């Protein structure tokens, strides 16, 4: 593993090179670079490794959580959509809960519509984590949150209630901080 990384080539491949040098890079760019360095195939295989509950799967989950690679999100979704066992489909959505970013938001309604009650509940968990981690704004997720509140599955409704309470508490704390800073006083 002493192979040197060709950073210039990687920056160019990620569209970060400019005629005069390179663009300023941020954490999203670093995330994309790590996905390229590790390799999409290896990350997708890590999803399969976790879903198969093999020894070391907890470490694989933690790495995928840290990186949140698009390739892993897509693989979780493919497992959900595929002919896999219901246990594997459930595990893929459970993993997606911690791996997802805003790109997974459109999939949540499909999880709510699945015939399996645990997949529905894990779908609510994906929504919960996206909001809790502030990876999506409440306004972006409002329609899904309302759907969860109206869902036939009690676990989904309970998760929605928990999320609403958390969002209220967070908004109140944010308002209190602003008021304490004097930025909103008359």
Image: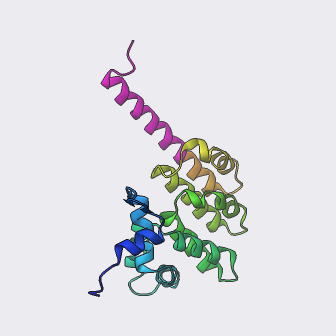
Residue 57 image point, x, y percent: 42, 81
Residue 182 falls within the magenta-colored stretch:
yes
Residue 21 falls within the magenta-colored stretch:
no
Inspect this view and state whether residue 65 appears. Answer: no
- For the N terminus, the quadrant is bottom left
Inspect this view and state whether residue 131 appears. Answer: yes
Residue 105 image point, x, y percent: 61, 57
**Residue 115, picture quadrant:** bottom right
- For the C terminus, the quadrant is top left
Please tell me which residue is depicted at 62% across the width and 67% down the height of the picture.
118
Between residues 72 and 146, which one lies in front from this camera angle?
Answer: 72
Q: Extreme left residue here?
A: 2
The answer to whether 127 appears left or right of 63 in the picture is right
In the rendered image of this protein, does residue 83 appear above or below residue 14?
below
Q: Extreme front residue here?
A: 19
Please tell me which residue is depicted at 59% across the width and 41% down the height of the picture.
139
Q: Magenta stretch: give its range.
A: 163-186
In the rendered image of this protein, does residue 185 appear above or below residue 29?
above
**Residue 179, picture quadrant:** top left
**Main SS class of the magenta portion in the image:** helix
In the rendered image of this protein, does residue 79 appear above or below residue 99?
below
The answer to whether 27 appears left or right of 42 in the picture is left
Please tell me which residue is depicted at 54% across the width and 73% down the height of the picture.
71
Q: How many labels does the image show?
A: 0
């Amino acid at each position: 593993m002493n192979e040197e990384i060709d950073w210039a080539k990687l920056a160019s491949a990620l569209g970060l090179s400019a005629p005069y040098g390179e663009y300023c890079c941020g954490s999203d760019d670093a995330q994309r670079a790590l996905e390229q360095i590790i390799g999409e195939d290896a990350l997708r295989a890590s999803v399969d490794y976790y879903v198969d509950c093999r020894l070391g799967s907890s470490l694989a989950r933690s790495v995928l959580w840290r990186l949140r690679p698009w390739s892993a999100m897509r693989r979780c979704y493919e497992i959900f959509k595929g002919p896999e066992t219901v246990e594997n489909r459930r595990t893929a959505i459970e993993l997606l809960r911690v791996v997802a970013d805003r790109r997974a938001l459109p999939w949540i309604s499909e999880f709510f519509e699945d015939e399996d009650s645990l997949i529905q509940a894990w779908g609510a968990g994906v929504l919960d984590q996206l909001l809790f981690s502030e990876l999506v704004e409440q306004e972006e997720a409002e329609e899904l949150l309302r759907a969860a509140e109206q869902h036939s599955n009690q676990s989904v409704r309970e998760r929605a209630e928990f999320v609403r309470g958390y969002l209220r508490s967070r908004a109140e704390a944010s308002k209190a901080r602003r008021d304490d800073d004097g930025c909103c006083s008359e």
